[in-house]
Amino acid sequence: MTVLLIYLVVFAASFALVRLLVHRSLSGMAARKTVTFGDESAVRPDRVASVLSVLTIFLLWGAFTGSHWVPGFLHAPGPFVGEARFTYTAEADGLPPDDATVTVAVSPLGEEAAAPQVPEGEGWAKDDAASVTAWRSGLIRVDENDAAGRDAGHRVVAVNDEPISPGGAVQTPYGRVGMSPKGTLTFEPAKGWQMEPIWLPAPEAVVARLVEIAQNGYRDSTLWEHLGWSLWRVVAGFVLGALVGIPLGYAMGLSGWFRGWFDPIVEFMRPVPPLALIPLVILWAGIGEAGKIILLFLAALWIMCIAARSGVSGVKISKVHAAYALGASKAQILRHVIIPNSLPDIFTGARVAMGVCWGTVVAAELVAAEKGAGMMIMVASKFQLTDIVLMGIILIGGIGFAIDVLMRWAERVLVPWKGRG
């Protein structure tokens, strides 16, 4: 929630700053440009906003992971590291209450620190020392070196002069001191706002893992083989889905019989997630490459079918009447009116279908895959290798974004009339 609020604040500040410094400087027709709703060509992405968005996400990532690539003054408060101290008050049968101090050496994650040497102090409750790692907690058996142990009714009744009982806790400047149901003290250092590397590694850790796998490979295959197999499966499934879905969509858009026959099937299968089909695909096609491609084919099929049907249904009837008035045949109307005017919807559907296929390939590669980006992510997640998981997600997203950019470029080249009526 904190990260989201910070992101929203940065967004609002960036929007106001760009409006003030950039848009105020525009003059002439650029300053008078207005948005025409329904005309897609009237709205273009603001490149400054894109750069600021990516930079903000990177800075938030680095700030909440303590990255060395982000200036230190931007770092969120990190976990406590150093020596922590707290005082406990103990009671025992036949003895007056006594105080002692516990010193805990908190070491950075991945390092081990020895418990500091402390004098025992006076009284029957002796000072104690312990060690723990940041983001972790540890038991502190303060009764072990006290003159009166548990056999003499030893019990801790307060921490830093605050009463404590089994199951309770006391917050100190260094962290949380709790008490187990059996009366043993536990110490958990303050975690701060930064994420533990096992949950979210720093950017440099992900890049280091990327370089390592690019050089040495992962599970007997190179990184490029993993990405190549995933790309091949996605492209094969998408192409097959388009080859079947687009003609089916045209037929449903042009024929009431075809639409009536296939509409229940398409509308029934459209909301079914591809992941739900995995058991059936395994039973019908096995665990080889055919099963994976069939799953991706089904992920793209219904999207492409609906996109083509929508494109055909959205053709303005005035254009069809004009073509008939000029003596065009049905084949010519299909070739010169229906297909060109439906291509924008088909390209939009293709971009959506490609994104869904990329999202499905991870699940498809769960089925006995030896190579693939999805396989890397799933295997790494079992061993809590979050840096590999994050690396795979970034690579899949980056490749998917590159494909989307390529498809948008092809759309601009092949369908220059999109958004122009």
Image (spheres, helix red, strand yellow):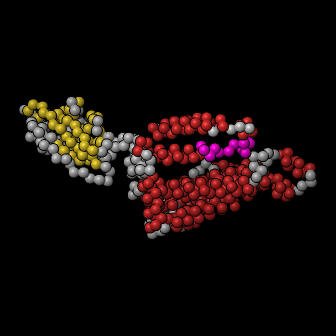
Frontmost residue, 163 versus 280: 163
Decide if residue 152 is in sight here: no
Please provide percent x and percent y for residue 31.
Answer: 71, 37
Position of residue 276 relative to residue 3, above or below, is below
The image shows a total of numbered marks equal to 0
Does 3 sit left or right of 242 as displayed? left
Position of residue 17 relative to residue 50, above or below, is above
Q: Magenta span has 43?
A: yes
Decide if residue 324 is in sight here: yes
Q: Residue at x 72, y 40 (%)?
A: 30
Q: Residue at x 54, y 57 (%)?
A: 396
Quadrant of the rendering where the C terminus is positioned: top right
Frontmost residue, 227 versus 361: 227
Q: Residue at x 57, y 57 (%)?
A: 399
Does 40 sit left or right of 226 as displayed? right
Does 92 sit left or right of 43 as displayed? left
Q: In the displayed image of the protein, which residue is found farthest to the bottom?
A: 220
Please provide percent x and percent y for residue 236.
Answer: 62, 63
Please provide percent x and percent y for residue 337.
Answer: 82, 53
Does 156 sit left or right of 297 as displayed? left
Q: Residue at x 22, y 34 (%)?
A: 159
**Image quadrant assignment for residue 174:** top left
**Image quadrant assignment for residue 77:** top left
Please provide percent x and percent y for residue 127.
Answer: 15, 40
Q: Magenta span has 238?
A: no
**Image quadrant assignment for residue 165:** top left
Which contiguous range is marked in magenta? Answer: 33-49
Majority secondary structure of magenta residues:
loop
